[in-house]
Amino acid sequence: AQTVTQSQPEMSVQEAETVTLSCTYDTSESDYYLFWYKQPPSRQMILVIRQEAYKQQNATENRFSVNFQKAAKSFSLKISDSQLGDAAMYFCAYDNNNDMRFGAGTRLTVKP
Amino acid sequence: KAGVTQTPRYLIKTRGQQVTLSCSPISGHRSVSWYQQTPGQGLQFLFEYFSETQRNKGNFPGRFSGRQFSNSRSEMNVSTLELGDSALYLCASSSGTSGWETQYFGPGTRLLVL
């Protein structure tokens, strides 16, 4: 079974600084998708960034970027120039179209 | 502790039918949230139930409804199914106390509408 591990239950960052959230996963598949979702207390799931496993280039969306290490099965999220609105739960997810798995989440606090 | 369970795991329906999906949360958890996962739209929030009351709701039509029982088990119902309802439906449970606690996701129910 595929598992997704987020080893940091909580992280804190100063406004305008950079923070990296870790995610590792376990799979025997070669083609799959990886996601980072942001979830505020309202429960809405906001897709932050998506990475296709066959693409070597790391995905980037404005202040959000990933460090995708396929061989190491690592998929970390870097948030640059952190803003107060970035405070939320962040979930790492794996999807190979047949099965979807989520990490336990990392609670990010942004200090003004 | 047993994890979140969802039944059935797979379902095939035809347009116009209705369907009911079930989610049993982790023992002690009072919050159950439902999500729809499609390739094109990603993961979208449907609604959240806490102590038998709908506490949060996403932007889905009224054909999507849910309820929660006194034992925290939750059901989701979709009436008058459309082809676009084909998706993976996930539920997640949590203690529900703050909105910031960890959610635990079930394996999902994959619905195919023909």
Image (spheres, rainbow, N blue to C red):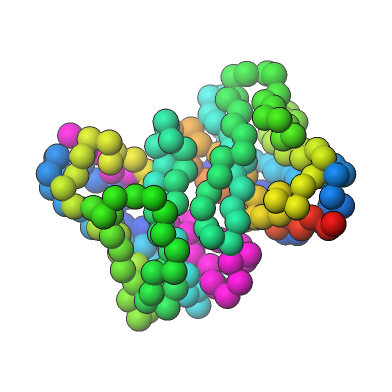
x then y, percent, for residue B12: 20, 42
Depth check, front residue: B21 or B27? B21
Relative to B35, A86 lies left or right: right
The residue located at (61%, 48%) in the rendering is A38
Q: Is residue A106 visible?
A: no
Q: Position of residue A5 (x, y in %)?
A: 66, 49
Residue A100 or residue B83, whichever sits in front = B83
Which residue is found at the position 54% from the left and 71% from the top? Answer: B96
Q: Is residue A90 above or below residue B73?
A: above
Q: Position of residue A44 (x, y in %)?
A: 51, 53
Which residue is drawn at the image coordinates 49% and 56% (left, top)?
Answer: B105
| B113 horizontally vs A12: left or right | left
Front position in the image: B37 or A56: B37
Count numbered badges in the picture. 0
| Residue A14, magenta (yes or no) | no
**Identity of the residue drawn at 74% across and 44% down:** A22
Question: Would you say B103 lies left or right of A21 here?
Answer: left
Q: Quadrant of residue B74?
A: bottom left
Q: Quadrant of the C terminus of chain B?
A: top left
| Vertical placement of residue B74 versus A13, above or below | below
Report the residue that reaches farthest toward the bottom: B70
Q: Is residue A107 left or right of residue B59?
A: right
Query: Is B104 part of what is drawn in magenta?
Result: yes
Q: Read off the magenta span.
A: B91-114
In the rendered view, tell whether residue B88 sits above or below residue B78.
above
